[in-house]
Image (cartoon, grey):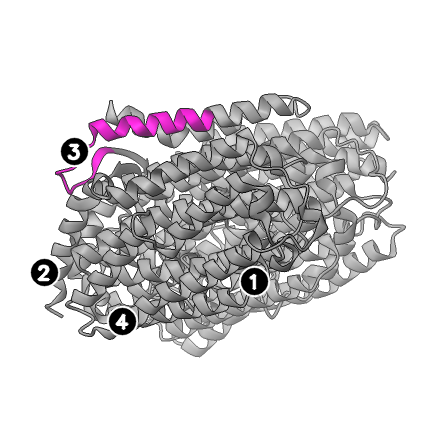
Amino acid sequence: MGIDLFGSLPLVVIWLALGGVGIVIQAFVRDNTRLVFGYYISTLIATGVLAALTFGHTGLTFDGMVTMGGSGAFFDILFCVTGILTMLAARPYLQREDSEIDEFYTLLVSAVSGMMLMAHANNLVVLFVGVELMSISFYVMAGFFRKSIRSIEAALKYFLLGAFATGFLVYGMALVYGSTNALDYATITSVVRAGTTPFPMLLAAGVTLMAVGLCFKIAAFPFHQWAPDVYQGSPTVVSAFMSTAGKAAAFSAFIPAFTMLMPVGAGASYVMNMQLALAVIAAVTMLVGNISAVAQSNVKRMLAFSSVAHAGYLLMGIVSGTAAGHQAIVFYLTAYTFMQLGAFVIVSILERENDGHLEFSDYAGLSKTHPVLAFLMAMFMFSLAGIPPFAGFFGKYMLFIAAIDSGFTWLTIIAVVSSVISVYFYLGLVVKMYFSDPVGEGHATNPGTAALTLGVAAAFTVLLGVLPSVLQSMFTAFH
Amino acid sequence: MGVAALLCTLFAPLAGSLALLLINRDQTKAIRVTALAISILTLGASLLLLPEFDQSLSSFQFVIDQQWIPAFDAGFRIGIDGTSLLLVLLTTFIMPIALLSSWSSIHKQEKEYYVLLLLLQFGMTGVFLALDTFLFYVFWELILIPMYFVIGIWGGKDRIYAAIKFFLYTLVGSLLMLIAIIWLGYSTADHVFTADLMKLQAAGPMIPFEVQKWLFLAFALAFCIKVPLFPLHTWLPDAHVQAPTPGSVILAAVLLKMGTYGLIRFNLQLFPQASHYFAAAISVLAVIGIIYGALVAMVQTDIKKLVAYSSVSHLGFVVLGIFSMTTIGVQGAVIQMVNHGLSTGMLFLCVGVMYERRHTREISEYGGVTKVMPRFAVMFAIAMFASVGLPGLNGFVGEYLTLLGAFQSPVLHSWSYAIISASGVIFAAVYLLWMFQRVMFGPITNAENHGLRDLNRSEYWQLVPLVIFIVWIGVAPRTFMNISEASVKALVETVGKVGNGH
């Protein structure tokens, strides 16, 4: 065991950059947002590149606490790319809102490091540390507009409920530890598979509590209530980051944890029940998310509910429990990250004075005042709705295949029904942008570096839809 | 050579729509001419298919099989048989006419409009060519986006409602079809997922009957919404009435045919036992549609709505012909698809001609138009008689054959389908002739109708080619029916062989 230096590089580099050099820079160079911005962008680029290099270098490091390469490295790349894209969009946004403070970038990178730890965790304690590192950074980022009541409300709500959910998670971990006598994934897996635990009820309770904690993080029903308020109140770029990278991170932890705790077809009796329970949660999550989104008049809130619904779709992959299901999740997360991030960034570009210009009616005639933004937004909406040839469609296709192959055709039918519901509000925005006339003069916008974010997001939304095998070919390294 | 022509037919509109993006939006003339030139070029490419196509073969020709997404055995697989060749030719033939008619009916955001229309053509051609369920689905859905914008941006007063209704209706059906496509993909003999239609065609009849029933229903729902079969037709009048004239023409001429084409290509071919099982039920709906569409058309006061409901009635014949499962019936259905495309497309163009002059489609606003527009009256009369099914024009051939098929059908076991449907022909004569009389004949009661201009040159160019084919099919249908005969025969044989066994 011991430490494999090369395989650990992405994690080591981001921690050193953050905890070592980053703090020094901020201590001595005050109020230099440009320097800090550049520094953290380079940090994320370096980490992403290192993750790409270690992709094929799979195994364990840090005495078996942390995995290397494979899906963890893939998620590292995804988190770093999302981080970079968010930072590019955040800079002009924060400048416009007059709140560009360099700590923002530090918090963002610290959240990324937490996410990476979650994706690499091979031990319950490591997972817990990762979750906390990410969540605490998020709590602060949600309240970053400290003069805005909504932002403070979002942060407080997120913190209180999040702390509660973390409590569930850690309690679940404790019960799993108590019943299997291990924190290490491999040992827990063998105990669960063999069904040799002396306390099967305790184990089942532990798994349930962990599922509750993780379902909170992905905003699945009935633990989704925080999402709309938090995403609406937080600075838009923060919502963009939380609802994409945050969700991806939660799923990156969900997949290995539930491969371990819920081995489909294994001896433990609670597995079937758990699978069914998650299937029901997935079904209700999609329906509730989409139906609630129909009723929204605020674009940010609509996107928040739609992100709840997407958690439901993604859960289908967990329910299927197969490698195909997990690959589908990874694909969908990647696709979802680009389209959701793109949509939020457009909102952030059009937004005015924190809360202004966020209603559906403010988007009337956008195709005439801002044709490019309207076109991109329409594309992201079609992709989120799952219309080919965009990435969102292919992700859904993969999830459907996985679910049907594991015998969950009824869940797929519910997914289809809720997709149809979702089309109503995604198209609602397109209707406003294209079929209505603009009200008054459109205001000038200056996307700045956010244009780069949009370009990348749009490119991937199309690319992953037309040539999905580009990404799929990477999945062979996962298992 | 054939393969090259096929690729050109498919991709020229896509390339054209991208090329249009490069033209400055103020140069509307250049945009119009380029779009039309591309569609004529595509028509030329598709005509090159004809000499290369071997009419005696029932299999797919000019097949291209390229891997696309290896993980799900989805490929870029296209090819053509007699049935799809006729429909591709219909598409490439209608598009230049629709584009030409747009010159006078579309006046805002022209660049976006022509880009979307060519994109639409790409999707429609793809639907008829795809030999891969995944590719088929992508093309099938690809059509939604441009059509949605065409109705929503350039449509009439209630365009937003009509556009959303069109989108949602189609999506409900097609998403259930997606589930069926996935389920079907696992139904191969070796249980390895595939989207290859060739492999699935071999596997289809082996699927257990209970499963086949569900798959049949999921596919049929998607296609019957598109056709539209009674009682799934309610999106159609809204979409037709609100869409701009060229949109209605394309919708009627090509988009509806995607549904009937799907019934032939997927339902009949992949699920023969289930087709036998459901044939009577679907035929009953088709017959109801024939009568219901005709009756509702009779009471319309809006000409465009009348033509829209006549589509419901006419497409009922097509569905009846398909599910008669006889060679004559299916052949009749295929030729009737082309016929309906030509004659209803032409009727919509005629309605457009009048609307452009008067900006109303109310029957009561007109009367005596023949006196001021004698040349238009001739054209309108030809379209109307073609739609009625007058012998010597195309509509007669299709309706006669589908009825004959239903009469002889070994699965329907009853003459009543044909007899009741035949009354639909009479109703068609009633509502179309009555409408024609009220609009075209009599004294000019409305002063505004005195100064109407007769047809201009562009309108001749739109209508005359249609007249040529309406007469051609009416007089010498064999020219066209020979193209699809081999593939239809083979289909009916396989379906008949397998189907009796359930």
Q: Are marks 2 and 1 on the same chain?
A: no
Q: Which mark is residue B497?
A: 2
Q: Which mark is residue B459?
A: none
Q: Amino acid at mark 4?
A: Ile
Which residue was labeled with disc 3?
A: B54
N-terminal-most mark, 2 or 3: 3
Write the start and end of the magenta stretch as one range. Answer: B38-63
Is residue A214 or residue B112 the one in the foreground? B112
Q: Amino acid at mark 2?
A: Lys
Expressed as whole percent of the image width and height from the top left, the position of residue A317 reads 43, 57
Q: Are marks 2 and 3 on the same chain?
A: yes
Q: Nearer the viewer, mark 1 or mark 4?
A: 4
Helix or strand or loop: what does disc 2 sit on? Answer: helix
Chain at numbered mark 2? B
User: What residue is rendered at 23% in x and 56% in y?
Assistant: B401
Residues at discs 3 and 4 in contact (Cβ within 8 Å): no
Q: CA distance from mark 2 to mark 1?
A: 42 Å
Which residue was labeled with disc 4?
A: B419
Which residue was labeled with disc 1?
A: A421
Expressed as whole percent of the image width and height from the top left, the position of residue A205 reads 49, 75
Quarter where residue B283 is shown: bottom left
Q: Amino acid at mark 3?
A: Asp
Helix or strand or loop: what does disc 1 sit on? Answer: helix
Horizontal arrangement in the rendering, residue A463 relative to residue B327 (left or right):
right
Is residue A470 or residue A422 the one in the foreground? A422
